[in-house]
Amino acid sequence: MCADMPDYKDTLFLPQTDFPMRAGLPQREPDWLAHWEKIGIYDRLRDKAKAGGRTPFTLHDGPPYANGHLHIGHALNKVLKDMVVRSHQMMGHDARYVPGWDCHGLPIEWKIEEQYRAKGLDKDDVDIVAFRQECRKFAEGWIDVQRAEFKRLGVTGNWDDPYLTMNYHAEAVIAEEFQKFLMNGSLYQGSKPVMWSPVEKTALAEAEVEYHDKESFTIWVKFTVDQTDDPALEGAQVVIWTTTPWTIPSNKGVVFGKDIAYGIYEITDCPEESWVTVGDRYLLADKLAEDVLTRARLEDGMYRRVGDVDASQIKGLRHPLHGVEGANGEWDDIRDFRAAEFVTDDEGTGFVHCAPSHGMEEFELYRDLGMLEQVITYNVMEDGRFRDDLPFFGGKAILRESLNKKNKANPWEGDANTAVITKLAEVGGLLARGKIKHSYPHSWRSKAPVIFRNTPQWFVAIDRPLGDGMDEHGTTIRERALTSIDALVTWTPKTGRNRLYAMIENRPDWVLSRQRAWGVPLTCFVKKGAKPTDADYLLRDEEVNARICQAFEAEGADVWYVQGFKERVLKDLHNPEAYEQVFDILDVWFDSGSTHAFVLRDREDGTADGIADVYLEGTDQHRGWFHSSMLQACGTKGRAPYRQVVTHGFTLDEKGMKMSKSIGNTIVPEEIVKQYGADILRLWVAQVDFTADQRIGPEILKGVADSYRRLRNTLRFMLGALNGYDAAQPVARADMPELEQLILHKLAELDVVVRKGYASHDFQGVFQALFSFATTDLSAFYFDIRKDALYCDPMGSSLRQSALTVIDAVFHRLTTWLAPILPFTTEDVWLSRFPEEGGSVHLHDFMETPADWLDPELAARSLKLRAVRRVVTGALEVERRAKTIGASLEAAPTVYLSPELAQIITDKDRFATLCITSDLTLSTDPAPEEAFTMEDVEGVAVSFAHAEGEKCQRCWKILPDVGTHKHPATCKRCSDALG
């Protein structure tokens, strides 16, 4: 600026704020956590509710396991829950959130056992109560760690009084809930194949299993026909195929498909290295014969089909180890042979070997035939080893106790399979062998494969009428659950309904028992000498049950293991010597499935009817918490414990790959918070479609941070513009220019979108709408236009006051609307403007937006007006790139309009303001050929012209009157503003 040119910078009403441009979230956020702690914000919100008028809203927390630091899935889950709770609170509810932890179970047991092994101790030599107390202490330590990590993410809740499944009251209620199944007759002890972890020595629920690829041995085994009505089949051999060679010693039969075509295939030639002999005759499904014989190294011409087979003519088979020296007659019984519905000729041989102790279909087949006593074996012990006295295989292990890192293909493989294969080959029982890679169940804790093993377990019958008087939604657990899914629960996304429905529709009875130490025991007694099928096998006595629960309430579940407890609770009621105490523990899914009782029903901050408004967890919980909670509640309260279920997907890396420490692509929440701040992580959550799998990584987070920066700049501009604004003197809408009325219309539209979006948990939709409004409608349009009036108009001008009134309305709404997503930033913004000692944006509700702000006609006109403006700015951009002008204020274009548009745009000065030009001419004359146009905007053309006059040194507009007023080098508006 020339020395003799006046400097009017200090006369402008520029935005003023101490709110920093750089967020510094990692440093600033802990201060807001301390502020919320100091003012007791969660309790103040509850006090607010006590004043009345607020409908309770309860999101019931699915408890994370108290073991280890948070991973990105934890962060996604808890932030989503926090957005639900905060948004419903600000929409006028009393939104309560009681965080909880799952404290019992195998992972913690394992950690304590590891500590024992490191000290050279054996868990079984340690007093069980002392062991359980160490488990409790371990869980307590991790609860404190995880609580701090959750709070650092800005998650609000009753952190001072969370629920823990190991609290005495919780343990007492879990026992009480179990006793309801005991008393209603649905509890029974049965023996059936269950998924069993030899490494962990316990049964597993489906929710505790994950599927991974595994390389398995596969063998084709010969069973010789022993009994038949067809002489042509005498001495022939039925061939079976299995991927579990270790089950062959437990074989009790072979089954066929009654609709499958079988043939008898005779060997006419064979290679030197083969387990077949010329003259052998094999029974195979015709569809699979060629494949099977090829695997036996036979080529075309080495065998021939000699006839059809009516499999029903075969009455019995000999086990391949039948009569083998040293077998001590173990396998000399003739094997059963019959048809079964589950046999197909899709793969294998068309025959299925049956070991009912290790396969559910075979178990059910023989159960329905009433033959279980004849076919159940007990060859495999709890550690996955064959019983010591099993000929040839005693002590052989199906799985190793620890990983064999040298065997990369199958690091858990024990010596049982190879021992069985070797013996079968030795006695001529093998036709072929190989390996197959297939999806196989593994324990999600130990990552070791599981087996199916027949064990005595405790079950809840889900198809048995309960007779409990709660039959509104069905008489059985399954009926109630299926009715609840369709009639009582809404699903987000809707596909969640189908998943849970299919699982419950087809599931077997619920296995409750686990053979471990750290958990709530099955609080029941069985009569000595009685059978599980006897009516008096289980002791059913309400007074005994009450004594147990009272003891648990006072002393915790540890008391069950104290010497003399049985005598204590049975005293004066039953003879303790007549009963045995059950020491299995409950499946931890029963623990968490019971939380509705000791949290929703029993706590003061629970719900009046013991039912949650929302359960929100990952999609894997359809077979986990959603599932167990449904079964448990349908058995004890007759219906689902929730009204809505919301599920989120899994978090993947930027390439869409599952996160894995071995790959090195894991993203740890703590690292994101340290680098960017929790609000950036939360903003990522809001930007993704959480109902599907999401991606996260360094580049994605950079994009999120950029979105945050743009949003922060919008908020910062409002803070600066509103500095000194007196909200007590707003301008009425009717007295505002149309541009301000348009922004109010936008706010009214957004109010509907935001409330509907938050109510339906569409955080992505809410944020996209708010971000677009803030960056496009405000920063790039409204603020850009109104900066001139805000900076240069006289302090009290009606235009400036109208703009500030609108910005104030935007500030209150945008800040609160964003608060559930960005709690730290919005708190910073709010208290920068309203610095109250105990203040917080989170103590406020979303402002009501007047319905009369909606003006569809104005909005329709504005769409056309903005389209015309876009043509003008496009024309000016051409001149800017050509360096004809440096800024739009140097232009005074002519805008040629169609008659229709000319009726909408009539005030050239107002339109020049919208286009941010110093002047502008409106014309309905034909446009010159060289005029600028846009294909997608009809009826508009623009011819460029330089603005005439001098540049006002205060507002920078180029006008003819500059320099003719009281203050040098100013236009009339600026000279008047200077006084």
Image (tube, grey):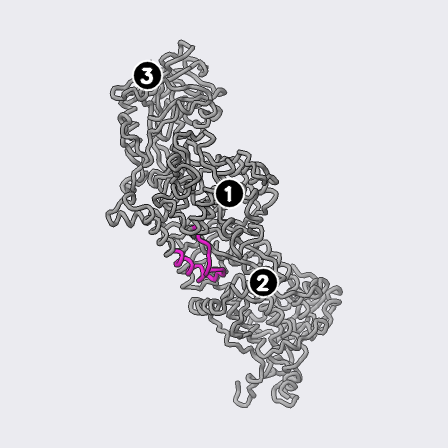
Can you give x and y, in whole percent of width and height, for residue 879 in the image? 59, 70
Q: How many marks?
A: 3
Element carrying mark 3: loop
Can you give x and y, in whole percent of width and height, for residue 838 in the image? 52, 72
Q: Nearer the viewer, residue 481 or 905?
A: 481
Q: Which residue is mark 2?
A: 49
Q: Which residue is mark 1?
A: 632
Apparent side of residue 585 relative to residue 462 in the rendered image (left or right):
left
Q: Which residue is mark 3?
A: 269
Answer yes or no: is residue 179 visible: yes
Element carrying mark 1: helix
Q: Is residue 164 magenta?
A: yes
Q: State which region is magenta.
A: 142-165
Q: Contact, CB < 8 Å: mark 3 with mark 2?
A: no
Q: Nearer the viewer, residue 917 or 932?
A: 917
Q: Is residue 484 magenta?
A: no
- As shown in the figure, which amino acid type bears the numbered disc 2? Ala
- As shown in the figure, which amino acid type bears the numbered disc 3? Asp
Q: Contact, CB < 8 Å: mark 1 with mark 2?
A: no
In the displayed structure, would residue 674 be above or below residue 230? Answer: below
Circle 1 residues within 10 Å: few <14, some 14–19, many ≥20: many
- Give the residue drawn at x 58%, y 53%: 608
Disc 1/disc 2 C-alpha distance (Å):
31 Å
